Image: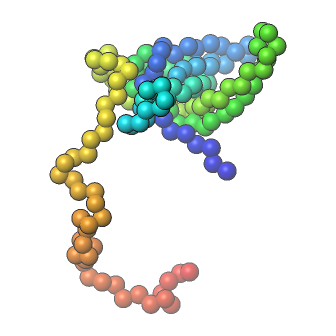
Amino acid sequence: MINRVVLVGRLTRDVEVRKTQSGLSVATFTVACDRRGSRDAQGQTADFISCVAWRQSADFLGAYARKGALIGVDGRIQSRSYDDRDGKKVYVTEVVADSVQLLESRSQSQNQSRPDSFPAYTPDPGYNTGADSFSADDFNTGPSLDISSDDLPF
């Protein structure tokens, strides 16, 4: 089974770092990830994904990451539940970060005109992505090899 998540987005608030009773650092944060041109029923164009990081990653985020910073998160989805003060069961789904990276310098993130605005990808107009842009000649760049099935290792 594979449970792998890669996120790129902006922090919606400053990272909150706490220590467990055993002294481990744990950081909680939310990453806003653009949906690329689609809107849901409420007009929302981004998903706000709860994340948690532990140990050195948590300390790093607490020291250097601020609201609006562009961040990359590599981790896994994890579900858990707990009972709140009223005894009601609360279910949580979050991304547990295995690694985190700041994807721009602090000055770049501070110079953003709107931290919650995401640049849209626009392909280079001179780049043709259609299948008809290739021809057989594109792949004939050298001498052909004469290999029999007896020469193959499998």
Q: Residue at x 48, y 35 (%)?
A: 7
Q: Position of residue 13 (x, y in %)?
A: 48, 15
Left or right: where 138 falls relative to 3: left
Q: Give the residue furthest to the top.
A: 85
Q: Is residue 74 visible?
A: yes
Q: Give the residue furthest to the front.
A: 41
Q: Give the residue furthest to the right.
A: 87
Q: Residue at x 69, y 32 (%)?
A: 79
Q: Position of residue 32 (x, y in %)?
A: 46, 26
Q: Nearer the viewer, residue 106 or 124?
A: 124
Left or right: where 102 falls relative to 21: left
Q: Position of residue 125 (x, y in %)?
A: 19, 48
Q: Is residue 72 visible?
A: no
Q: Residue at x 42, y 29 (%)?
A: 45
In the rendered image of this protein, does residue 123 appear above or below residue 92? below
In the rendered image of this protein, does residue 108 appear above or below residue 98? above
Q: Residue at x 56, y 80 (%)?
A: 154
Q: Nearer the viewer, residue 30 or 16?
A: 30
The image quarter in which residue 58 lies: top right
Count of picture labels: 0
